[in-house]
Image (cartoon, grey):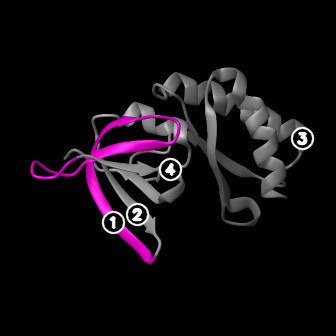
Amino acid sequence: MAAAELESLVDNCISKHGVHLIEIAIKGEGNGKTVEVFIDAEQSVTTEMCSEVSREVGEMIESSGVVRGSYRLTVSSPGIARPLKFVWQYKKHIGRQLSLRVRLQDGERDVVGRMESMDENEIVLSSGKNTAPESIGFDSIVEARVVAPW
C-alpha cells in the first residue's frame, strides 16, 4: 500500500465535507494495522464531521483495496499537540498562545507569544508587556504549535 495513493484518495473523498486532510498515519502491520486520518476545518471539527468522513473514507478504502487485510480506521482533528501545517490553520488561533520555532540566518530560535493578527504572509505575535509585537513571516516558521491554556 502506498501512503501517497491513500492520501490522494482520502483527500478527494473528504473535500466535499468542508474539511482538509492534515495527515494520514499508518501504524502496525498485517492484521493489526491502524489507519489514522487527521482532518481540520477553518472553524472547528465536530464529531459529526468525523463520523461522516470516517464512514465515507472506510467505504472508499474498502472499494479501492488500497489497504490490504484488516485494519482499524480512526478519523479525528489533529488536536492541540500536533503542529500547524498550513497557513489557513492559523486564523482560528488568533488570540491564542503559540510556541514557534523560527529560522534565522544563523540558526533557529524559539518564540512564545499571543497571536494578535495575521495576513497571507505573516503573523503578529505579542510576547510580553514590555516588548513590541513581532511580525513573523510564514516562510521563516519551522514549526508552530498552539499552547494549551491549562
**Numbered disc total:** 4
Quote the CA–CA distance across marks 2 and 4.
Answer: 11 Å
- N-term-proximal mark, 2 vs 4: 2
Identify which amino acid the numbered label 1 is placed on: Asp
- N-term-proximal mark, 4 vs 1: 1
Q: Which residue is mark 2?
A: 101
Q: Are marks 3 and 2 in contact (CB under 8 Å)?
A: no
Q: Residue furthest left?
A: 130
Identify which residue, 136 or 77, lies in the foreground: 136
* Residue 150 position within the rendered picture, expressed as x and y whole percent measured from the top left: 19, 47
Up/down of 10 relative to 23, above or below: above
Chief SS of the magenta region: strand
Between label 3 and label 4, give the one nearer the viewer.
4
Between label 2 and label 4, give the one nearer the viewer.
4
Q: Which residues are magenta?
A: 106-132
Q: Which mark is residue 135?
A: none
- Identify the residue shown where x is 88% and y is 36%: 63
Q: Which mark is residue 110?
A: 1
Quote the CA–CA distance across marks 1 and 3.
Answer: 44 Å
Identify which amino acid the numbered label 2 is placed on: Arg
Judging from the image, what secondary structure is the residue with disc 2 in?
strand
Identify which amino acid the numbered label 3 is placed on: Ser
Count residues near mark 3 (Cα–Cα under 10 Å), then give few for <14, some for 14-19, many for 20+.
few
Q: Is residue 116 left or right of residue 51?
A: left
* Residue 73 position within the rendered picture, expressed as x and y whole percent measured from the top left: 65, 45
